[in-house]
Amino acid sequence: MSTFDEEAVRAKIATVNVWYHTIEVGGVVTPGLYDMRPFLHKYRFPTHLESRRVLDVGASNGYFSFEFEKLGAQSVVATNLGSYLDHDYPRWYRDELLRTQSKDQLAAATWHESTGGFEVARECLGSRATQVLTRIYDLPTTLSGQFDFVFCGSVLVHLRDPAAALEAIRDVLAPGGTVVLATCIDTTKPDASYALFNGKPEEVSWWVFSPEGLMRTCRMSGFRDVTWIDSFVVASRHGFTDTIGVVHLRR
């Protein structure tokens, strides 16, 4: 349980400039870019996670990690990038960042955009969830043991090799375990298999799948049981919208 009063919580929240998620922390709601609370039912998470080891891949500020704790997870591991430069940038864009940004600026970007929100929310909530800093491709070599339940939300769009990322997730999934995968989708031709190339380096945005393309990519990555669950439209605090598709996977 948190031991901070509301004023202290507000002060801690203010130390982080970028809140991706809207999270209620100690009676204070963070200024998240996305408020996923109204859409929680769309993911069709289990009603309880007792005795399960849970992994939240690309957890950002940790909204879903803390929800999994509420569902009684035995333990929750949340992964984030250890460095702002660990984003899946094109090499030329990464080189440009190294040329134009100082070490202090890059360290600040890492805190504000990757690790800081989770640490602040975790402390204020009195959460037992742990943060592990790793790229998604390195999950099998960074994490110990396997996980009964894995969530990966809004990460694939930011990866140059989504199939390799899904293979890494499969490698850390325990036999009989479940993956809930959510990502931006294009519904122009829902029955056709394709991925649109976004090509926005400043957003680290690579691919947007059609529903069929996403499911085929999951199968190609080694998942035998691939089930389409739902899709929904979510608006950001800045006014732009994304269509999110949800898929459940088993080995």
Image (cartoon, rainbow, N blue to C red):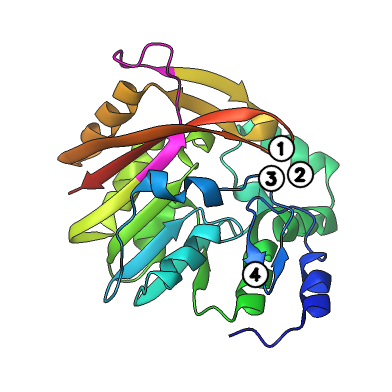
* Classed neighbour count for the residue bearing mark 2: other residues with Cα under 10 Å, few (<14), some (14–19), many (≥20): few
Q: Residue at x 63, y 45 (%)?
A: 34
User: Is there a contact, CB below 8 Å, between mark 2 and mark 4?
Assistant: no
Q: What residue is pinned by disc 3?
A: 33
Q: Is residue 36 above or below residue 27?
A: above
Q: Which mark is residue 95?
A: 1
Q: Are marks 2 and 1 in contact (CB under 8 Å)?
A: yes
Comparing labels 1 and 4, the label whose residue is closer to the camera: 4
Mark 3: amino acid: Leu
Cα–Cα span, label 1 and label 3: 28 Å
> In front: mark 1 or mark 3?
3
Q: Where, by quadrant of the figure, is residue 198 drawn?
A: top right
Magenta stretch encompasses residue 136 = no
Disc 1, SS: helix
Chain-order first, disc 3 or disc 2: 3
Camera-side residue: 142 or 37? 37
Query: At numbered mark 2, what does the secondary structure look like: helix, strand or loop?
Result: helix
Up-down relation of residue 4 to residue 13 (above or below): below
Please name whichever residue, 24 or 56, is drawn nearer the observer in this view of the structure.
Answer: 24
For mark 3, give the secondary structure: loop
Mark with earlier residue (1, 4): 1
User: Which residue is tagged 2?
Assistant: 98
Residue at image coords 56%, 40%: 88
Q: Residues within 10 Å of mark 3 (few under 14, many from 20)?
A: some
Q: Is residue 160 visible?
A: no
The numbered disc on residue 121 is: 4
Q: For the residues carrying marks 2 and 4, which lies nearer the camera in this image?
A: 4
Residue 73: give x, y in percent of width and height: 36, 73
> Which residue lies at the image location 28% right of the left edge and 71% below the top edge?
52
Horizontal side, residue 102 vs residue 53: left or right = right
